[in-house]
Amino acid sequence: MVNVVGLGYIGLPTALMLAAHDVEVVGTDYNKELVHTLQQGKTTFKEEGLDELFQAAVQKGIRFSQEYQETNMYIVSVPTPYDKESKKIDARYVISAVKSVVEVCPKGATLVIESTISPGTIDKYVRPVIEENGYQIGEDIHLVHAPERIIPGNMVYELVNNSRTIGADDKKVGEQVKEIYQSFCRGDIVVTDIRTAEMTKVVENTFRDINIAFANELTKICRSADMDVYEIIRIANKHPRVNILTPGPGVGGHCISVDPWFLVGDYPGLANLILAARKINDSMPEFVLSRIAEIMKENHITDVGRVGIYGLTYKEDVDDVRESPTLQMMECLEEHLASGRVKVYDPYVHKDIVPNQYHDLNGFLNEIDILVVMVGHQEIREKISQITDKIILDTRKITEKRDGVYYI
Ligand code: SAJ
């Protein structure tokens, strides 16, 4: 039986996928309400194909509990926040999950960490916790790091089709874990050592961050040169060895905007390109604000209260608002004492998390003159061509060029 610990964005789909493929699974989370919701047969976040997967897993007998189970394999997928000041990982959830596993696991169990961790975390935090409890690693407990790679918005598909990395102290144990993942994963599964797996994961997200930063820097250059950045990227990408990503209002989410900081925090003075990329991406929400100011001036609009921000999530068609560019922008606005004036709307965010948040699109549109598209949710993609009575600042390039439409 596999005990999946932490039933969030990664743990839940992983647990469901294993169960749906005939692996006996118990999903554990310390959040009572979350476990209760799952036990009642409801999923806890929106994701393409997740509800169907949930049904399949329930039929195969998946169970949910607040208790850690006594079994021979654990998959830990708990959050790994980072300290905003030092930029270093805050490993407290991983440490506490490992402690709890060690308290119940029989000798010889395998402990797989799926959470993204900064390179070196297993040596620095996980091994000591296990050893302090009198367990000998490699004898009493086997350690593995199998970092997740799935992208929110396409998680179910990517769980099955992505290749993945398994880092293990002992290759044989790595191969055994590989077999478990092969119950559902059709991608290549590479077995390597733990430090390599830790570093590879962070490198992947850092690569994407740097590529997006390049696109965002080009946007600023093209804005100053009065050129069309999208056309330039479109043409450049026709080169067989060029693949520039898409500029936008910033980089959010809990992965790409966080992981590169681990390298910056741990290797100050060495991670220079990585730091520059982070700074560029972090500067984008403020850049959008400066564009809003320019456009207001150009159109003789003086009332910030007539500006409407579409989108609060960190990207399209997800309900996750962590580190979202809009929230970053609202923080900048707060510094200018204007955050309470702009109107905000997101079809995926039902709770009020910012001032002046609307919950119906028409009501929101009725109150504004400038529509700032921060997130290209399906809803706005479908409606944007009909919104002809507003000035639009489209940071996601979902709108055709026409009078009154601006880009970043
Ligand atoms: N973004 C751009 N331009 C782009 C692509 C993305 O501005 O061309 C922005 C998005 O709008 C968003 C942010 O970047 O704000 C990150 O979104 P994303 O879709 O690029 O990635 P995540 O954070 O949802 O998921 C990433 C993925 N990593 C890579 O593609 C290398 C995913 O595979 C990882 O599993 C995930 O991080 C993770 O959990 O680490």
Image (cartoon, rainbow, N blue to C red):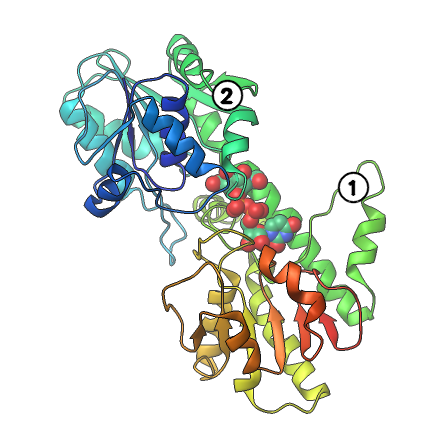
Q: Which residue is mark 1?
A: 242
Image-quadrant location for residue 58: top left
Q: Is residue 366 above or below residue 170?
A: below
Nearer to me, 173 or 313: 313
Q: Position of residue 254 (x, y in %)?
A: 45, 49
Going by the numbered disc 1, the residue's amino acid type is Val
Q: Is residue 115 above or below residue 179?
A: below
User: How many angstroms separate mark 2 from mark 1 (CA)?
Assistant: 30 Å
Q: Is residue 395 visible?
A: no
Residue at 37% x, 69% y: name it. 352
Residue at 72% x, 66% y: name it. 385
Extreme residue in the top direction: 172
Q: Is residue 159 left or right of residue 8?
A: right
Q: Position of residue 261 (x, y in %)?
A: 47, 49
Q: Is residue 133 above or below residue 142?
A: below
Secondary structure, mark 2, is loop
Q: Position of residue 259 (x, y in %)?
A: 47, 45
Quadrant of the rendering where the N terminus is positioned: top left
Q: Earlier in the sequence, mark 2 or mark 1?
A: 2
Residue 185: mark: 2
Secondary structure, mark 1, is loop
Label 2 crowd (10 A; few <14 / some 14-19 / many >=20): many
Nearer to me, 194 or 93: 93
